Amino acid sequence: KQEVTQIPAALSVPEGENLVLNCSFTDSAIYNLQWFRQDPGKGLTSLLLIQSSQREQTSGRLNASLDKSSGRSTLYIAASQPGDSATYLCAVDAKGAAGNKLTFGGGTRVLVKP
Amino acid sequence: NAGVTQTPKFQVLKTGQSMTLQCAQDMNHNSMYWYRQDPGMGLRLIYYSASEGTTDKGEVPNGYNVSRLNKREFSLRLESAAPSQTSVYFCASSNRQGRVDTQYFGPGTRLTVL
């Protein structure tokens, strides 16, 4: 059974510092890995999707890397801003016998202090 | 473009009561999903529908039923609510294209069972 872990559960940094969020998964047979952002009381917004054949994806200040063999992904957020405060979740996509299933980590709650 | 909509946004039930959570998407997606999110945990898949007319159990299906009414709508029913079903429920939809399957989430329904 796939298990996804995110450590730390919470992180507080001063504005301008780079953020490094970690995600690990137990089964390397994945189609892709996604990073989501969740604001309090809101749904999830997809940030980046890395396919299993890729090693990284970039979007603006966000960069996500994937090392399938070691079961790890890292989300980097450069020059953090207070608006980056949110919970970040990673999820792996492993196609099941009858459909598509995402397995989520518990999330890292980020606070960027002005 | 509304994306994924969910009703109601909040609900309080007494143990043993029943209710149906509604979800609709206007993106012409084939697949739809119901997740629950508990404090400190990631999202867990309850049921999903890979296409109109099909539904399958996810990780935590006990106590729930679903109906894929048509391509747009996917409802989740609690027949006899229990306090353990107090959670935030998210609906999502997606259209897999090759190995890429980005899921789009609704805003969630906060359910409390007393």
Image (cartoon, coloured by chain):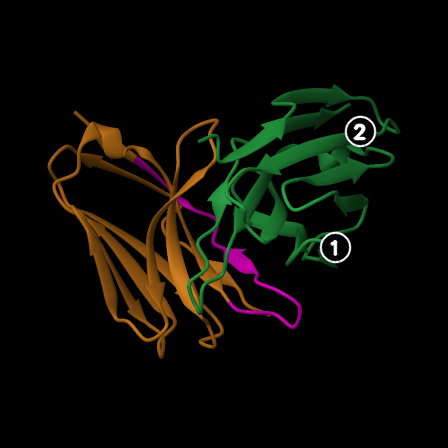
Residue farthest bottom in this picture: A69
**Label 2 Cα crowd, 10 Å radius (few <14 / some 14-19 / many 20+):** some
Split into 4 quadrants, where in the image is the C terminus of chain A? top left
Split into 4 quadrants, where in the image is the N terminus of chain A? bottom right
For mark 2, give the secondary structure: strand
Distance between mark 2 and mark 1 Cα atoms: 22 Å
Magenta extent: A94-110
Figure check: A97 above or below B25: below
Dominant secondary-structure state across the stretch colored magenta: loop
Which mark is first along the chain, 1 or 2?
2
Left or right: residue A45 versus residue B16 is left
Residue B8 in percent (x, y) is at 65, 23
Left or right: residue A111 versus residue A109 is left
Label drawn at residue B53: 1
- Circle nearer the viewer, 2 or 1: 1
Residue A100 in percent (x, y) is at 57, 62
What number of labels is visible?
A: 2
Chain containing the residue with disc 1: B
In the rendered image of the structure, the colour used to display chain B is green
Q: Give the chain ID for the orange colour.
A: A
Q: Mark 2 points at which residue?
A: B19
Mark 1: amino acid:
Gly
Residue name at image x 85 percent, y 27 percent: B15
Residue B30 in percent (x, y) is at 58, 54
Mark 2: amino acid:
Met
For residue B13, which quarter of the picture?
A: top right
Closer to us: B29 or A84: B29
Residue name at image x 72 percent, y 39 percent: B75
Q: Is residue A10 magenta?
A: no
Label drawn at residue A38: none
